[in-house]
Image (cartoon, helix red, strand yellow):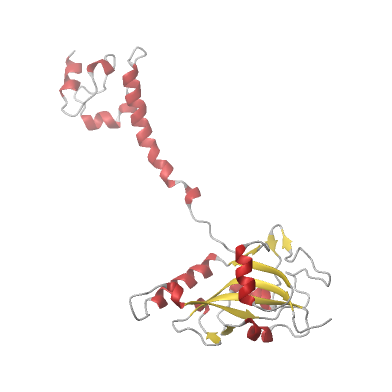
């Protein structure tokens, strides 16, 4: 009975006497902090009341629940290689880019691009830093982000594209769900993988200007829609010397409107 009285005499213990009528503590002078830390060492008697079991279960639950917060599945997945997503004709994004393109010709496909995370992050940080330089209270990155075009050349037998004279629904070559990029020398595949690749690049507000930089004499051409960062609205063309200032967002695959075959 002395041991029971000692437990009840601790000022912070709120467990009733009936909860541990048959429980023996290892130390007769166990404090409330010792009791909490060593609860798992208490041998609960079979005839102990249900309330004491609930107390033990609750303490165990509280001590283990915190580990679920560190679930590794919650981490953001990094994109290591450019992802190509073909838009459907009925997709609202498709119409937006088609209307922006504004060239009257056959469009084989509009591909939405998700560039590698390292390029995306560099571009976003650059936008934020440039927005802070703007005069006035409005520092929105949207005010300095301009959608422009970039025409480029591709290998005639580009490993990535599957286009024939009759047209083809499978525009992009894939191997194990991975785009089959050319190894080197192809402007299309180079930009898709690395953006402007630390080179100066020219971008135009109008697609007809960028059309001049596509392959001559080839029916199926390619053009990028690029997000360009500039504090002042570009007039006609924009030369970007900083790789962070431009990021490809869409790829348009289309027939040359001036070529008749």
Q: How many marks?
A: 0
Q: Quadrant of the C terminus?
A: bottom right
Q: Is residue 251 left or right of residue 44?
A: right
What percent of the width, then of the height, locates residue 99? Answer: 62, 73
Q: Residue at x 61, y 67 (%)?
A: 113
The location of residue 227, given as percent across then percent down, is 54, 75
Of residues 88 and 203, the one nearer the viewer is: 88
Could you tell me residue 223's position as x and y percent?
66, 77
- Residue drawn at x 49%, y 56% as measured from the top left: 76
Q: Is residue 126 visible?
A: no
Which of the 4 image quarters holds residue 213?
Answer: bottom right
**Side (left or right) of 37 relative to 115:** left
Establish if 58 lies above or below 239: above
Residue 84's place in the image compared with 60, above or below, is below
Instruction: Please indicate, yes or no, whether residue 70 appears anywhere in the rendered image.
Output: yes
Q: Quadrant of the N terminus?
A: top left
Report the residue at 64% width, 72% height from top: 98
Q: Is residue 148 above or below residue 174?
A: below
Along the line of sight, the residue nearer the viewer: 103 or 108? 103
Q: Residue at x 54, y 85 (%)?
A: 238
- Residue 116 screen position, x and y as percent: 56, 66
Query: On the picture, is 30 further left or further right than 166?
Result: left
Question: In this rendering, is residue 257 above or below 182?
Answer: below
Residue 114, quarter of the rendered image: bottom right
**Does residue 154 appear to the left or right of 248 in the view shown?**
right
């Amino acid at each position: 009975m002395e041991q029971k009285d000692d437990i009840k005499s601790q000022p912070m213990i709120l467990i009733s006497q009936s909860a541990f009528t048959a429980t023996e503590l290892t130390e007769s002078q166990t404090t409330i902090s010792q009791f909490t830390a060593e609860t798992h060492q208490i041998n609960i008697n079979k005839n102990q009341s249900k309330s004491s079991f609930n107390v033990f279960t609750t303490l165990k639950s509280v001590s283990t629940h915190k580990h679920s917060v560190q679930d590794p599945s919650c981490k953001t997945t990094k994109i290591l290689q450019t992802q190509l997503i073909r838009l459907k004709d009925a997709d609202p994004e498709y119409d937006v880019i088609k209307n922006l393109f504004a060239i009257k010709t056959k469009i084989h496909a509009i591909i939405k691009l998700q560039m590698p995370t390292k390029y995306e992050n560099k571009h976003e940080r650059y936008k934020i830093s440039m927005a802070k330089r703007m005069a006035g209270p409005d520092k929105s990155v949207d005010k300095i982000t301009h959608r422009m075009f970039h025409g480029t050349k591709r290998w005639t037998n580009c490993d990535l594209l599957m286009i024939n004279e009759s047209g083809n629904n499978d525009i992009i070559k894939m191997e194990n769900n991975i785009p089959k990029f050319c190894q080197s020398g192809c402007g299309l595949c180079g930009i898709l993988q690395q953006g402007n690749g630390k080179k100066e690049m020219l971008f135009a507000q109008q697609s007809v200007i960028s059309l001049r930089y596509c392959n001559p004499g080839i029916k199926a051409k390619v053009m990028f829609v690029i997000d360009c960062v500039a504090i002042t609205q570009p007039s006609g063309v924009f030369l970007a010397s900083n790789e962070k200032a431009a990021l490809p967002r869409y790829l348009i695959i289309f027939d040359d409107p001036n070529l008749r075959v």
